[in-house]
Amino acid sequence: MNVLSLFNGMNTGRQALENVGIKVNKYYSSEIKPYAIELTQHHFPDTIQVGDVTKWKEWAIDWQTIDLILSGSPCQDLSSAGKRAGINGSKSSLFFVFVEILEHIKSLNPKVLFLQENVGSANKYDIGIMSRALGVYPVRINSSLVTAQLRDRYYWSNIRTKETMFDVVTDIPQPKDKNLLLQNIITQGRAIDKKAFALLQSTSVSFGGYRDKKSNIVQVALRKRHKKSFLNIIEEEGFIRYFNQIELERLQGFQDGYTSILSWNKSMSLLGDGWTLPIIEHIFKFIEQ
């Protein structure tokens, strides 16, 4: 397949295709975050970086050869964790750039497949706008079925659809529940919660800068944010801590060390902003080859 991945992040789409045995011919990545590009090229050096999504009309791509387009457009304006500016907010409105690109490819290749993901806490009004723009309503899947993380997300796709009385809907079944608990994936210590709260990119800023993780200021901050259900805490040797890098990778379904070339802060940023690998693998298994 020839693939175009918008808002590519840490390249989960490419890894998922490889893991389910779908051969990739050309993989175009639109990403502007330097360390996301660094991680992508580390694992898949043949990835073709095309740059800023808003400059897509300048890209040197044979558009009619694209078989699959991926998009995880920004969720900050849609998420309950944000300011709720909605789909027309400054970041989440980039969804409409994805729609422009998709329509351009469709005009040349009507059979192109697509996958669009966004946050489960988006309001129904915005979900309706996005669904009508794409011509299909989404399936809602929580990553807790395949990982130890609560991560509720909508997925729009024409990989497999069905028609109802009024609409076309994404017909991807729920993955089988693996019954993974947080205690199962931590490297050491005791998990306070059964499942992890959703990883957030913002946590990389909140806690990544503290050198002394056992300092009183960190201990107090961790307890306060845990009480508000913002993040989890692990008890270890008389102190509490947040997740280490391996645990972060496991919570998104990646193998240990996948982000080891990056610092904890950068790893947390990408994983908190990214896709859950086993969910994307599950969806891709329904691509007809």
Image: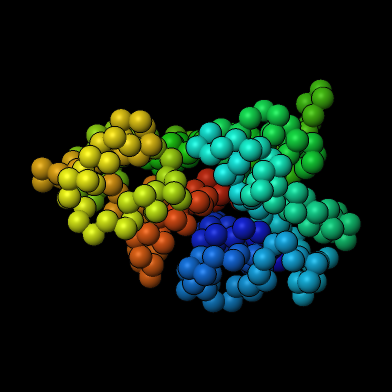
Q: Quadrant of the C terminus?
A: bottom right
Between 187 and 273, the residue placed more toward the observer is: 273
- In the image, residue 245 lies at what x, y percent? 32, 57
- In the image, residue 69 lies at what x, y percent? 71, 57
Image height of 232 relative to 65, above or below = above
Residue plotted at (62% across, 58% down) = 7
Colour scheme of the rendered structure: rainbow
Between 246 and 171, the residue placed more toward the observer is: 246
Image height of 158 relative to 29, above or below = above
Residue plotted at (79% across, 41% down) = 133
- In the image, residue 90 lies at what x, y percent? 66, 48
- In the image, residue 135 lies at what x, y percent? 80, 39
Is residue 57 something that shows in the picture?
A: yes
Total labels: the figure holds: 0
Along the horizontal axis of the image, is 66 left or right of 246? right
Residue plotted at (30% across, 49% down) = 243
Residue plotted at (80% across, 54% down) = 100
Q: Quadrant of the N terminus?
A: bottom right
Between 10 and 110, the residue placed more toward the observer is: 10
Name, please, the residue furthest toward the left: 238
Name, please, the residue furthest toward the top: 165
Residue 265 sits in quarter: bottom left
Is residue 112 something that shows in the picture?
A: no
Along the horizontal axis of the image, is 143 left or right of 284? left
Name, please, the residue furthest toward the front: 217
Between 31 and 143, the residue placed more toward the observer is: 31
